[in-house]
Image: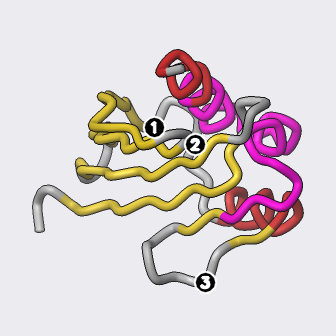
């Protein structure tokens, strides 16, 4: 099932580059929670997730992203990533992604830390 997270991240990157609401919605279950920081109030459901995503969107091609699977517990995946912005900072990322049986995320939480800070 590690292929499930690879597929999900590929779709996440496609949505990241397109900022298309349909691509964003396709990543998440209708009742999903998306946390931009571990203790932040989540964006709940498609409407809030799409709105939050588009408010914070990156321009297509603005960043390179590399990742590796750090671990898994059932349907919960732990992903380490590096986001390198062409005209800005580089971030270390930790994602916790809980996938539903259909491959969409039920929960998504991200930690990001500026490597320059």
Q: Which residues are magenta?
A: 9-33
Q: Residue furthest top?
A: 3
Residue 96 location (% of width, % of height): 45, 52
Foreground label between 3 and 2 = 3
**Which of the two residues, 102 or 81, is positioned nearer the viewer here?**
102
**Residue appearing at x 36%, y 62% in the figure:** 111
Residue closest to the eye, 26 or 75: 75
What secondary structure predominates along the stretch shown in magenta? helix
Q: Within 10 Å of the Cα at label 3, are there few (<14), some (14-19), or many (20+) other Cα atoms?
A: few
Crowding at label 2, few (<14), some or many (≥20) Cα neighbours within 10 Å? few
Q: Is residue 19 left or right of residue 26?
A: left
**Residue found at the far left of this picture:** 116
| Residue 14 figure quarter | top right
Q: Helix, strand, or loop for circle 2? A: loop
In reply to whether residue 102 is colored magenta, the answer given is: no
Colouring style:
secondary structure
**Residue located at (37% from left, 31% from top):** 65
Tell me if residue 84 can be seen. Answer: no
Q: Mark 2–mark 1 contact, CB under 8 Å? A: yes
User: Which residue bears the numbered disc 3?
Assistant: 41
Of pointers 3 and 2, the one earlier in the residue sequence: 3
Q: What residue lies at 64% left-to-right and 75% top-to-bottom?
A: 42
Residue 99, image x, y percentages: 64, 41
Location of residue 103 in the rendering, given as x and y in whole percent from the top left corner: 71, 30
Q: CA gap, disc 3 to disc 2?
A: 25 Å
As for residue 22 lying within the magenta part, the answer is yes
Q: Which mark is residue 59?
A: 2
Q: Which residue is mark 1?
A: 62
Residue at (70, 66) in percent of width and height: 52
Task: Compare residues 76 and 79 and report the one nearer the observer.
Answer: 76
């Amino acid at each position: 099932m590690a292929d499930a997270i690879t597929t999900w991240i590929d779709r996440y990157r496609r949505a990241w580059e397109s900022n298309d609401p349909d691509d964003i919605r396709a990543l998440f279950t209708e009742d999903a929670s998306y946390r931009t920081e571990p203790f932040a109030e989540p964006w709940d459901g498609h409407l809030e997730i799409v709105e939050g995503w588009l408010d914070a969107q990156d321009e297509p091609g603005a960043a390179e992203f590399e990742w590796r699977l750090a671990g898994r517990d059932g349907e919960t995946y732990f992903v380490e990533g590096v986001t390198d912005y062409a005209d800005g900072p580089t971030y270390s990322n930790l994602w916790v992604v809980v996938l539903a049986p259909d491959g969409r995320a039920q929960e998504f939480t991200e930690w990001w830390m500026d490597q320059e800070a």
